[in-house]
Image (tube, rainbow, N blue to C red):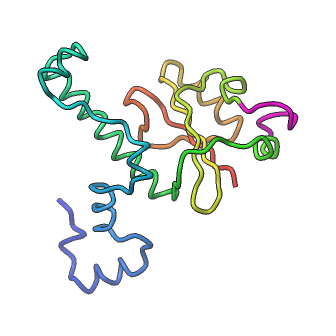
Amino acid sequence: MNYYYDLPIDVINHIESYLIIKPNEIVNFINNPPKNIQKMLTPLIENTEYNRKLYKMTREEIDEYNNEFDAINKNFIKFSVEFGIKSQKYVGCRKALKYGLISSIKDSFNLKEIIPSCDHQREFITHDKKNIIISCPYNYNENYTNEQHFKYNFKRYPNYLYNKNCFTYILVLE
C-alpha cells in the first residue's frame, strides 16, 4: 500500500515543492527516456518465430531475458536521473592521474589493470562535468571484490546495472 498518495493534495504539493524532479516526471522519464539515455540501454529481443530461431531460445526464455533487461534498463534510467548522466565518455588521463588511478600521464587508464576483479566497466560524464565509473563484477567472492573496489573509493550501488548476479560499484570523479 502506498500511503504517500493517500495524503491530502496540499501536503503532497508541499512535499513535491522541495523535490528537483517530481515523481510523475520520473515515471514519464522511465517510460520515455531521452535519446542519449535510450542509446545506452540494452535492447530487448522481440518475441517472434525468427528471433527464437536466431537466438536459439524458447518463447519463455526470451520473455525471461526481456523481463530481466527491462528491470536493468529501469535501474539504469533511475541511475541516470540520480547522477545526471549526459553520455558515455572515457575518463581522461589527467583525471585518472589526479585520483591516483594511474601513475603517469603517459599511462593509459585501464581499470582492469588496477582492479583485477573489475568487470563490465562503463564510464560516463554528467551534466556538471563529473566522470562516473561503473564496475559490475559477478558476485563470486564478495569480500575480495569489496576490498579491491573500496581501496579505490568505489561505493556499492544498491541496484544492479548489468546483471542480477553482479554487484554494482560506482566511483564519482569530481
**Is 31 situated above or below 70?**
below
Q: Quadrant for the C terminus, please.
A: bottom right
Q: Nearer the viewer, residue 173 or 41?
A: 41
* Residue in the image at 59% along x and 41% along y: 123
Percent from the top left, x then y, of residue 108?
77, 31
Please say whether residue 104 is one of the residues in the magenta stretch. yes
At x 67% / y 26%, what residue is drawn? Answer: 115
Does the magenta stretch mainly form a helix, a strand or a loop?
loop
Farthest residue, direction front: 50
**Image x and y of residue 137, in percent:** 52, 26
Q: Is residue 102 magenta?
A: yes
Q: Nearer the viewer, residue 3 or 149?
A: 149
Instruction: Report the side of 133 relative to 58 (left or right).
Output: right
Answer left or right for 147 relative to 21: right
Q: Position of residue 11 (x, y in %)?
A: 28, 83
Quarter of the figure that contains the N terminus: bottom left
Q: Residue visible at 15% across and 29% down?
A: 47
Q: How many marks on residues? A: 0
43 relative position to 137: left or right: left
Residue furthest to the bottom: 10
Point 34% across, 84% down: residue? 14
* Span highlighted in magenta in the image: 100-109
Q: Position of residue 42 (x, y in %)?
A: 36, 36
Residue closer to the observer: 168 or 8: 168
Placement of 126 over or under 110, stated as above or below? below
Left or right of 35? Residue 103 is right
Position of 113 relative to 80 (above/below): above
Nearest the viewer among 134 and 86 is: 86
